[in-house]
Every structure is written in C-alpha cells, then in structure tokens.
Amino acid sequence: MDMEKMMSDLHKSGYFISKQHLCGFSISGKTDELDPLWIQEHLDSQWLGRHICCFDQLDSTNDLAQMLAQHHAPEGTAVLTDYQTSGRGRVGRVWQIPPGRGLLFSFLLYPSMEAAKIPLLTLATAVGAVKALIQTTGVDAGIKWPNDLIVQNRKLGGILSEARFAGSCLSHVVIGVGINVHTQRHEWPVELRDTAISLQQATGIFFNRNELFSAICRECEHSYNQTFHDPDPIIQDWTRYSKTLGKEITVQTPSEEYHAVAEGISGDGALVVRTGQGEMRTIYMGDISIRHGRRQNDD
Ligand code: BTN
C-alpha cells in the first residue's frame, strides 16, 4: 500500500495526521479534541476565528459570546465548546447533543448594517457552512429555509443568530452554529432518529472537528465580506444550495399554518411562497416543512 493511501485511510478512520516538513507525517491518535492552537496555526481566514475561546463545557456558546461582546471582544471572536448544558435553538427550542459529538460554536460580529438586513448574515453563515462541509467532507449538504443545514433530507445542523441593539443602533450580532459530527443513531432521542443525522452517520467517516471548523471560518469570512459589500451573490449561492425552493411545503407562522410552494428568496432573506390560491406571500418568521418525500416528524 502506498504511503499517501495509507495516510488517507487512517485519516478517514479518525486519526489526526499532519504533514511534517521534510520528515513525512505525524499521526496523533484517534481523537478530534477541540484544539484552539491547531486551529490558529491552520486558519487561513484573515479576521474570523482569529480569537478563539474554547471550553470543555458551557451553558451556551451564544450566551458566552454575548458576554464577551459586553467586554468588547474583537470582531470575529469565536467561542467553541465540547458540550452545552443549555444549548438553544430557534423559537425557544432546546439544542442538545452528547459531549464531543458536535461542532458547537458562535461568532461575534459588529456589522454596520440596517437591522432589516441581519437575516442575510444567517443566510451567509448557511452558505459558508455548506460550502465548507462540501469541500471538507464531500457530503451533498444543502440548506432548508431559514437556516437548517441538511443532508439526505435530515437535519445536520442549525444556526441561531441573535442581535443586540444600543437604542436603535445595532451593537453586535452573535451567530451560533451547531453541527452534528459524530452522533450515532442510538444517541439521538427516539423522536429525532428519523429526522436528524450526523456527518459520521451520513458518510461512515470520522471527520476532525478542528479541520471542519477552520474550513468554516474561511468560507464564512468570505460570505460575510461579500454580504457587507453586495449581498446578491450570497442570495444566488443560497438559492444554489437550497433544498427548499420549488418544493411543496407547509408553512407554520406564529399565527397560521398553510400549504404553499417555495418560490424564491427576497433581497433581505425572507422566503417568498405561492399559496394554493395563487397568492404570493413573503415570510420573515416561521418554520416550513417540505411535503414531498416527507418523513414522519419532518421538521
Ligand atoms: C436551530 O436549528 O434551531 C438552531 C440551533 C443552533 C444551535 C447552536 S449550538 C451553538 C450555539 N449555541 C447555542 O446555544 N445555540 C447555537
């Protein structure tokens, strides 16, 4: 067996391998413990993830990032943890994943943009994360509006963006991302077993979370820079990776539920749908489920 092939097989099985200048390879054991020093050495982003706070356990990375914002932590600061005791999802849901099984992090941004455009940062994060996942793992990852990362029609990850204002001025935005990396079927609560998926379940491969995270920093930085400058290409990329558009969906808003077809995404990140009566509606808040090929409990 040639050396490169052997190293590639070991890497797929979860061994952490780095190429050493002049003297071949170093193999550091089957682990993907979060390693901020490794990440900082291997990052090729300019500002995103350049300051990293990494913990074994936290209530929620979003909460810690909010606290760091009060202390004026630098733009692009990232908070990572192995486990959250009070991880939060959208619309007040709990986001729970066993220790060491997920990539859980938050970015802190101080964008100068109108409040109405903040949802674009969530779309930009989804685009960056999907690109990084495809490049790093080869999975056919996509996006379900507004911010679910999906693989094989199941939820691989989610994004929770939280903005804070000083009066009417945007002070900062915390963007929290949770990606299921190693969770096994038996580790999911029964009600999620058919709707959630991890990278390891989807591919059989043990991906290293440090490598995934540094690829996400690179791609999200590119997406954010683009969004600050001209968001059109982000909307185009979002459309390209969308697994929602053109599909029959059920829309659940705080006030109603109805069937529609997902037609497009507006310039400020809202979903444009056509109802059964042919009426076009723009949805800023709510949830959708895809009706075709729908699984039980699909969310
Ligand atoms: C969702 O799909 O509902 C969004 C889930 C977002 C979860 C991430 S995990 C890291 C960050 N910290 C949190 O408490 N939530 C986000």
Image (cartoon, grey):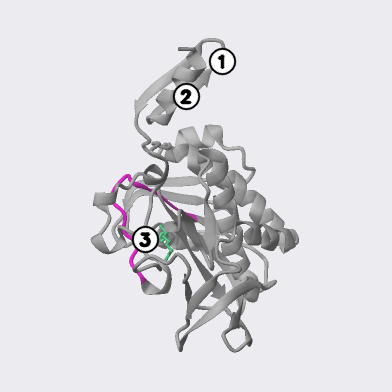
For numbered disc 3, what is the local secondary structure? loop
In percent of the image, x 65 and y 57: which residue is there?
A: 240
Dividing the picture into quadrants, the one containing residue 115 is bottom right
The amino acid beneath tag 1 is His
Vertical arrangement, residue 65 with respect to residue 216, above or below: below
> Is the N terminus in the top left, top right, bottom left or bottom right quadrant?
top left
Vertical arrangement, residue 25 with respect to residue 203, above or below: above
- Disc 2: CA contacts within 10 A as few (<14), some (14-19) or many (>=20): few
Give coordinates of residue 148: x percent, y percent: 48, 62
Q: Which residue bears the numbered disc 3?
A: 195
Which of pointers 3 and 1 indicates the residue nearer the eye? Answer: 3
Label number found at residue 21: 1
* Residues rendered magenta in the picture: 93-106
Label number found at residue 8: 2
The amino acid beneath tag 3 is Thr
Residues under labels 1 and 2: Cα distance?
A: 18 Å
Dividing the picture into quadrants, the one containing residue 218 is top right
